[in-house]
Structures are given as C-alpha cells and as structure tokens.
Amino acid sequence: MALESSRSAFERARRSVGGGVGSGLRAAMPPHPLFVREARGAYVWDLDGDRYVDYVMAWGPLVLGHGDPRVLSAVSEVATKMQVVGTGHPLEYLAAEAVLEAVPHGERLLWSNTGTEAVQVALRLARAATGRRRVLKFAKSYHGWHDTVYAGMSEDDCDRPATPGGAGQSASVLDDLVVARFNDVQLAERLLSEAVERDIAAVLVDPVMSNAGVEAPTPLFLSTLRTLCDRHGVVLVFDEVIAGFRIARGGAAEKYGVLPDLSVFGKAMAGGFTQSAVVGRADLIDQVTSGVVHAGTFNANPIALAAVTATMRVLADPAVYERLERTSSEFEALVGAVLGSSPDFGSFNRVGSLLQYVPAGGATGLHGTSGLWAVILEGMLRQGFLFMPSGKVFLSTAHTTADVEATAEALDRLLRTL
Ligand SMILES: Cc1ncc(COP(=O)(O)O)c(C=O)c1O
C-alpha cells in the first residue's frame, strides 16, 4: 500500500479544512489519515484504489458494514420524496416503534442527530425531573465533546473537582460533575449516599467503557447503580451510543439485565446515517411537553429515519447477532493468539463485536493508545488493514472468517519483523 494519494490529499485538505479531517480525533492516524474513495461491506478503497479490511467501521455505526443494500434502498426511496420537512411524517413513529420494540425499557423516545446532543437532552430531562444539578460520571468515559461532560477524563479526577478534557472549555460547568470510578461499587455507594447533599440528578454511565479499554461491568456494578439511584432519587442514564444495538439488539439493558431510566443511542441505530435518540421512561421523556426544551432543525429527518427503520428491521433477526458474535470471537481467538505469542505484545478486551487493544503495561486512550499500538496501526495499514488510533476494533456482519484469518496472518508477519 503506497498511501501516496492519501498523503497528498491530506496535505491539500489541511489548507482548507481545520486539521485536515472532519473530526479532530481522526488526525491521530500514523503516518496520516487514509483518504477513501469508496466503501462497501467490510472494505474501503483508498484514492490509489488499494483495498483495506476496515475495522474502523466509521467509529461504530456500521454494524451491517458499509452500504447495506436494504438500508440504501430505503433511504433512496424516501430521499426522492422528501428530505427534511419541519413537521410530522410517519417515519417519526414507524422508526420510533421499531426502536422501542428492541429496547427493554423503551416506553418513549426523542430524536436527535448526534450522540453528543442526545446526552445533553438526557441530562436536561434528569435535571428537570429531580430539580438537582450535578451528574455523576465515571473517569475516562467519553460522552461527547460538550463542555458539560468532556471532563473528568482521568482516574486522578475521581472524587475530586473534574478537570476539563481540552483547552477552551468553560470552567464554570465543571462543578456540575462528580467523578467516580467504573466498577468501583464502594465509591459509587459513598458518593450516591450523599446524592441529596451533593445535588446529584443523574448517573451517566457507559456500561462497557467503550472508549476506555472496553471493560465489561462486574456482575454487581450496574445492579448496584440501579439500586442506589432508586434509593436516592437519581436518574440512571446508560450512554449506549456505541454499545446500543451492537453488543446485543437491546443493548446493555438486554445483555446485563439492568434497566436504566434513560438510554442514549446513536451510531448503530441508523446503519451509517446521522441519528441519535434518548429512549426510556415515558414520564421523563414527556417533560418535553411541560417545559423541557428539546429542539433541532434536522431532528427526525426522513432520510435518517428511513435508515433507522430499515436497520432495525435487519437487526430484528437474531442471526445478525449470532454472526457478529462468531466473527468477533474468531477475531479475539486468532488475532489475539498472535499477540499472545509474547507478553510484550499486549492483548484485546472484548464485549460482543467491540474490542480494544490493551498494551502490555500501557494505557488505552481516546486520542491514541500507547506501547506497540502505533507500530501495529501503521504496519497493518501498509498491509491493507485499517484500524483506529485508539486501538478499538469494530466488527460487522460484513466481515468474514477469511478477513479475520488474513488479519491474523498479516499481524504475525508484522510482529516477526520487530
Ligand atoms: C459512548 C459515547 N457517547 C457519546 C458519543 C458522542 O456521539 P457523537 O460523536 O455522535 O456526538 C460517543 C462518540 O463516539 C460515544 O462513543
């Protein structure tokens, strides 16, 4: 893989697009971001025409791979009839019914566009319902880039004033956060037992730490959060923007049997189109009819909701999740075995079709993962395998056993040269 055209495209893009790529985190790709001219199934083709097995899957949405024909035909049919209408249309409730049917605690939903937006809506609903201000989140977990939640990104922030995730963020909203540690039941118990004094409205948790190592919750963790939230009048919000419809059709609630008050979904729900939702208790959601503002010009646009309806129809087939589980466990076994040949090579954590590389003695990170990963990332790219800077690995129903076997062989070749 020469990567030549991507290098010159990146240089050109940097002259017109801030940072050269549409989302800052994508720039962390060594030697530079890949520029793609076509994407189909499990593959992308770069500007030179070289093909890559894609484990980025657009950072999560593409559970069905690129360009699933069932999603595309639903979108094309609607796109010729209407694009965005600024009033009601049947896909609003047809898509909502399909989502609510899949989510165990799905009584009602609100449509938004991105995960970042939907998280803000969920927190607003929790504050309105409780009359409290603060949100308990877990160190390192990512809930979008807004000032209100992109903070407390380090374990050092636990039970201390949260620090902002980046420059230019407002210090005045940091006091709205209380930071706990994922899977630390005792700390959660201590902080939530003072929920009234601490003014805690919501617990916001990514149930599988999908941006910080992919960590499964311990058997007691989520159920203890549920009990504590009930006891202390706190709204439990699952951020399932990545986990939703990926680790199970009904997301974390189905997989772990703990029902939150609200869940935030995005990514996988719309098969590659822009859509997110806050799903959960009707009494919380219905506050939008009594003073809580939820707005957005492009909310519930017909094109995205055609994609949601088609995607949810495909995801209703249990064979989808059987296939995802089979290919993902093959990846874990075969590619993981190559890493297992030396204690220095690191390993993978996995929950369903979501994996993350964990370096030996190193740390995973939103912007990039330390240790050997940068070497693996570039070495695999040059052999035709596209991974993410953070070391996360997304599989889809389009990936095959042959793709996974080829990945393991390429990684083995690479590691032997070190
Ligand atoms: C767990 C989680 N929550 C929220 C978000 C924000 O979603 P979006 O990028 O659509 O704004 C993300 C994005 O990656 C996420 O992974």
Image (tube, grey):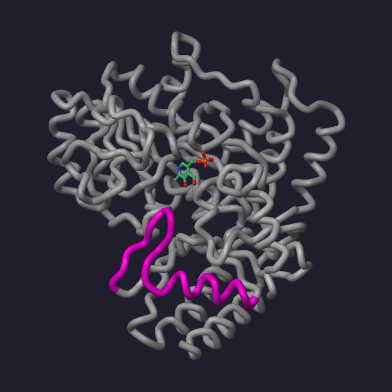
Within the magenta stretch, is there residue 377? Answer: yes
Which quarter of the rendering shows the N terminus?
bottom right
Viewer-proximal residue, 76 or 357? Answer: 357
Q: Residue at x 50, y 51 (%)?
A: 25
Residue 84: percent from left, percent from top: 74, 24
Asked if 366 appears above or below 202 in the picture, the reply is below
Which quarter of the rendering shows the C terminus?
bottom left
Residue 156: percent from left, percent from top: 20, 49
The boundaries of the magenta stretch are: 361-383
Left or right: 416, with 399 as reference point: left
Residue 363: quarter of image:
bottom left
Asked if 61 appears above or below 34 in the picture, the reply is above
Q: Residue at x 62, y 26 (%)?
A: 299
Residue 162: percent from left, percent from top: 24, 38
Q: Residue at x 30, y 27 (%)?
A: 173
Asked if 399 appears above or below 307 in the picture, the reply is below
Magenta span dominant secondary structure: loop
Residue 357: percent from left, percent from top: 42, 68
- Residue at the far top: name it: 290
